[in-house]
Image: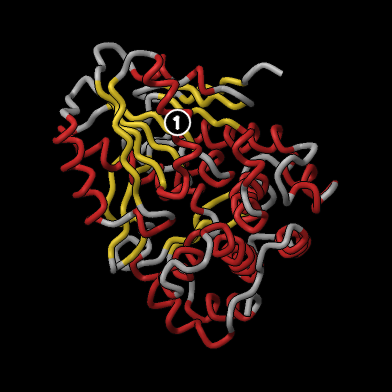
Amino acid sequence: MPASKIPVGGERPYEVVVGTGVLAELPPMIGPGAQHVAVIHAAGLAAVAEPVCRVLAGAGYAVHAEPVPDGEAAKDVSVAATLWSALAAAGVGRTDAVVGVGGGAVTDLAGFVAATWLRGVRVVLVPTTLLAMTDAAVGGKTAINTPDGKNLVGAFHPPAGVVADIAVLASLPQPEYASGLAEVIKAGFIADPVILDLVESDPAAAAKPGGPHERELIERAVAMKAAVVSADLRETGQRETLNYGHTLGHAIERVERYSMRHGEAVSIGMCFAAAVGMLAGRLDTATARRHWSVLSAVGLPVRFRGGAWPELRSAMTVDKKTRASKLRMVVLDGLARPSILADPAEELLELAYCEVS
């Protein structure tokens, strides 16, 4: 089956290429005038980064492989600073490029380094996890973490292209794959209910690599996000709805010191958001309860520890959607009808947390 090319519009349009064996699509994305390409990759993915480097070297570029820590440890200012020094030593100039190979943490980091190096150089992303393919690598959000919260330091810097080779997912551990599926399911709840139908038709198959609907699920999730970010790159309106489940999800990640997978935290966060919507009278009970059923069916958590609410509520105060000290939550007014609930009552939030604890 030929590769799919999903366009992402906006001020700097690009394509997300989805398919198997699609690395040949990478060199044309580097752009004219480039001589040096820095390939930032997770240290544990050297074997995956090697063919990327080989393809780029074969196209005539001077390739500089730059390994970084695996997971969220990569998204630290000290790692970014080390990479800035490496780019300087390699002679990466304004017409050159950065390629990020890895999961969501590495694509976030590579994008941030590209956005800040010489006030912005091209970046091409090669996501290697389901989470990165369907969420982190698409949309131009780049960031690193600080002790105060996740993704608080960053920039909007759209990639010049994204190459999503589904073949690399075959070796992904099942829990990591299921974590990425949380973002796919999120796309189903906020925009494309067909995703939910496909997952529910065979949850066990959907929860692991190589399922019968894998490519369609990826393409639908990417297309949903592409449509949203094309209309609203800088999160001034519609894009905010992509944060469904992330208000509590990011708080859980912070409280857990990022030891919990992102998708697992967002899964609980979506159930919490569904409970908030239901208790606020905005979401019907059946759609709310569907969150618990579909997420648990693919092995994702839907509950968190009972006594954690005070700590979680404190962590939610640094949520990026908070304005004028008032919390803003993405909720559903119905299936595929996301909206904003501003300044929800504390009693409502606490009651909603009881539904997931």
Any part of residue 288 in sight: no
**Relative depth, front residue between 36 and 184:** 36
- For the C terminus, which image quadrant? bottom right
The single residue placed furthest to the right in the displayed view is 201
Residue at 49% from the left image edge and 39% from the top image edge: 47
Residue at 38% from the left image edge and 57% from the top image edge: 321
Q: Is residue 60 left or right of residue 221?
A: left
Q: Describe the element under mark 1 as helix, strand or loop.
A: helix
- For the N terminus, which image quadrant? top right
**Relative depth, front residue between 94 and 44:** 44
Residue 278 point in image, percent of width and height: 66, 66
Residue at 55% from the left image edge and 64% from the top image edge: 265
The single residue placed furthest to the bottom in the displayed view is 307
What's the amino acid at mark 1? Ala
- Quarter holding residue 352: bottom right
- Quarter holding residue 33: top left
Residue at 24% from the left image edge and 17% from the top image edge: 35
In the figure, 356 relative to 50: above or below?
below
Residue 46 point in image, percent of width and height: 44, 41
- Quarter holding residue 267: bottom right
In the figure, 170 relative to 1: above or below?
below
Q: Is residue 20 left or right of residue 147?
A: right
Residue 237 point in image, percent of width and height: 42, 43
Residue on which disc 1 sits = 231
Residue 94 point in image, percent of width and height: 18, 24
Q: Is residue 252 left or right of residue 75?
A: right
**Relative depth, front residue between 129 and 346:** 129
Any part of residue 253 in sight: yes
Q: Is residue 171 left or right of residue 231?
A: right
In the figure, 48 relative to 281: above or below?
above
Q: Residues within 10 Å of mark 1 (few under 14, many from 20)?
A: some
**Relative depth, front residue between 57 and 72:** 57
